[in-house]
Amino acid sequence: MKTELQLRPPKVELDVCPKQVPTLTKGAGIGLRSLHYQYILNHKPKVNWFEVISDNYFGDGGLPLYHLEKIRQDYLINLHGVGMSLGSSDPLNKDYLIRLKKLAARIEPDWVSEHLSWISVGGHYLNDLIPLLYTEEVMERVASRILQVQDFLGRQILLENPSPYLTFTDSTMTEWEFVERLVKKADCYLLLDINNVYVNAINNGFDPLTYLDAIPGSRVKEIHLAGYEEREKYLLDTHGYPVHPPVWELYQEALARFGAIPTLIEWDTDIPSFEVLMAEANKAEGFLEKVQ
C-alpha cells in the first residue's frame, strides 16, 4: 500500500553551503552488477568503492542480498535508486522508503542517491525515467518531496541530473537553473552525471560548459561517467559503451571547477568483463590524481 508521508512546510531557499559530512568514498568506483559478483569475491580487485541500484536489493533475503553483504565486508557500497519518483504528483511511496531505509541500515552507505525524474502516475509505475517541466510550481513540489524523504531517511540525499530527450515549451527556466536552485531549496547534494550533461547539450543545442558554470560546486558530491550510443540525429544514453572522448574532456572541465569529486563508472547494458570496467575506473583515477 502506498501512503503519503507527513507534509511539512518547505524550507526557505538556502544561500549557504550544506554541512560537509566526512565520508569514506574517495577516487573512482564502479557500478556493481550481478555478472561480476563471483569475480569480485574470488579476486578482490583493488576498487575504491561500488555503487548498486538500491531497488534490486529490497528483498528480505535471497542471492542478490547475500552477495551484496559478502562484498560489503571488503568494500564500501553506496546506494543509487530509480524508483522514488520524486517528480511525480502521486503521494510518496512510504513502503519504498521503508525498504530503502532498512537497506541503508544494513549496508551503511556513505550516501543514497536518486534521479530527478518521475516514473509513477496514478499508482502505476513506468519502466523509464520521465523528465520534468522546469517551473516554479514543479520546483516547490519536488523540493517539498525531497525534504520529506530526507526527514524520513534521516540523511541528505544526492540528486542526479536527468537525460531527457525533449524539452517543454511551458518551462520557465533552463535545466541547469532548475537544478542549481532545487538543490539549494531542498538542501540536498548533487550527483552530477557528466555523460547526461553532454548528451543533453548535443541533443538540445546548448553549451555544456554553461551547465557546469551554473552548478554550485559545494553541492557536488559524486560524478557519474558512462557511454552513449550515436544515433542518426541524436545521442542515446544507453550506458552500454566506454566513456567517449568528449565526455572525458567535459569530465576534466568539471574536475577543474569542483575538485577531485568521487567518480563512478556506470555500465548497464552489454556489460563487459570486469577488467574493462576496471580500465575505465583507472582512467578516471588518473584524472582525479591530477587535481588532488
Image: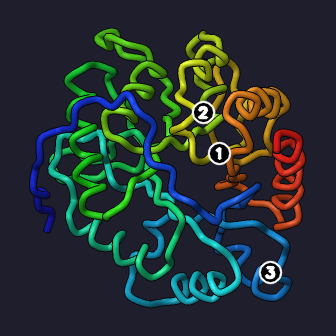
Return the x and y of residue 145 as percentages of the image width and height: 23, 45
- Looking at the image, do the residues carrying marks 3 and 1 touch, with CB atoms under 8 Å apart? no
Relative horizontal placement of residue 173, taking residue 222 as reference (left or right):
left
Q: Nearer the viewer, residue 204 or 224?
A: 224
Q: For the residue carrying disc 3, how many other residues have a C-alpha within 10 Å: few (<14), some (14-19), or many (20+)?
A: few
Spatial CA distance of label 3 from label 2 is 29 Å
Q: Which mark is residue 39?
A: 3
Alpha carbon separation for disc pair 3 and 1: 23 Å
Q: Residues within 10 Å of mark 1 (few under 14, many from 20)?
A: many
Mark 3 secondary-structure assignment: helix
Q: Secondary structure at mark 1?
A: strand
What residue did someone put label 1 on?
224
Q: Identify the image quadrant of the N terminus.
A: bottom left
Measured as percent of width and height from the top left, residue 237 is found at 62, 37
Q: Is residue 256 left or right of residue 276?
A: left
Q: Quadrant of residue 252?
A: top right
Residue 206 on image: x %, y %: 60, 11
Residue for point 10% across, 50% down? 7
